[in-house]
Image: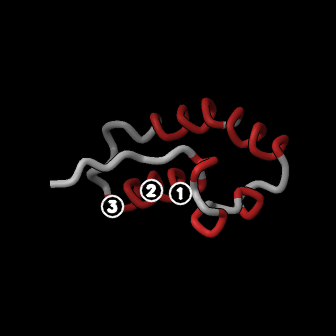
Amino acid sequence: MTNKTIPARKDCPATEKWHLSDIYATREDWQAARDSIPGQLDDIQSFRGSLKDPQQLLNCLTKQDEM
C-alpha cells in the first residue's frame, strides 16, 4: 500500500484545479452564500421527526440541494 498525501493547491497543475469563478463570480458572492447558511440550517432542522413522510423527505432533500 502506498502512502499518499494531498498536495497543497499551489503545487497542483492548473488543469487539476477547480475554476472557483464558475461557482461564485466574486468573493462577495461566496461570502453572501456562506453567511446565509445558518438560517438555512434552521430550515433543514424543521424537518426533524417528519422524514418518514415521502413528501417531507423530498422537501428536505430539495432544501438541502438549494443550500
Q: Residues within 10 Å of mark 3 (few under 14, many from 20)?
A: few
Q: Nearer the viewer, residue 5 or 49?
A: 5
The quarter of the picture where residue 8 lies is: top right
Q: Quadrant of the N terminus?
A: bottom left
Q: Residue at x 42, y 41 (%)?
A: 47
Please, which residue is most extreme toward the bottom here?
Answer: 15
Q: Residue at x 76, y 37 (%)?
A: 31
The vertical placement of 18 against 10, above or below, is: below
Q: Is residue 26 left or right of residue 61?
A: right
Mark 2 highlights which residue? 61
Q: Residues within 10 Å of mark 2 (few under 14, many from 20)?
A: some
The quarter of the picture where residue 15 lies is: bottom right
Q: Type of residue at label 3? A: Pro
Q: Are marks 2 and 1 in contact (CB under 8 Å)?
A: yes
Q: Is residue 32 left or right of residue 18?
A: right
Mark 3 highlights which residue? 54
Q: Nearer the viewer, residue 34 or 14?
A: 14
* Alpha carbon separation for disc pair 2 and 1: 6 Å
* Alpha carbon separation for disc pair 3 and 1: 16 Å
The vertical placement of 63 against 18, above or below, is: above
- For residue 65, the mark is 1
Q: Please state the horizontal and vertical placement of residue 66, each as a whole percent of the image.
A: 60, 55
Q: Type of residue at label 1? A: Asp
Q: Residue at x 73, y 64 (%)?
A: 22
The quarter of the picture where residue 57 lies is: bottom left
Which mark's residue is nearer the viewer, 3 or 2? 2
Q: Is residue 57 left or right of residue 34?
A: left
Of marks 3 and 2, which one's residue comes earlier in the chain?
A: 3
Which mark's residue is nearer the viewer, 3 or 1? 1
Task: State the SS at label 3.
Answer: helix
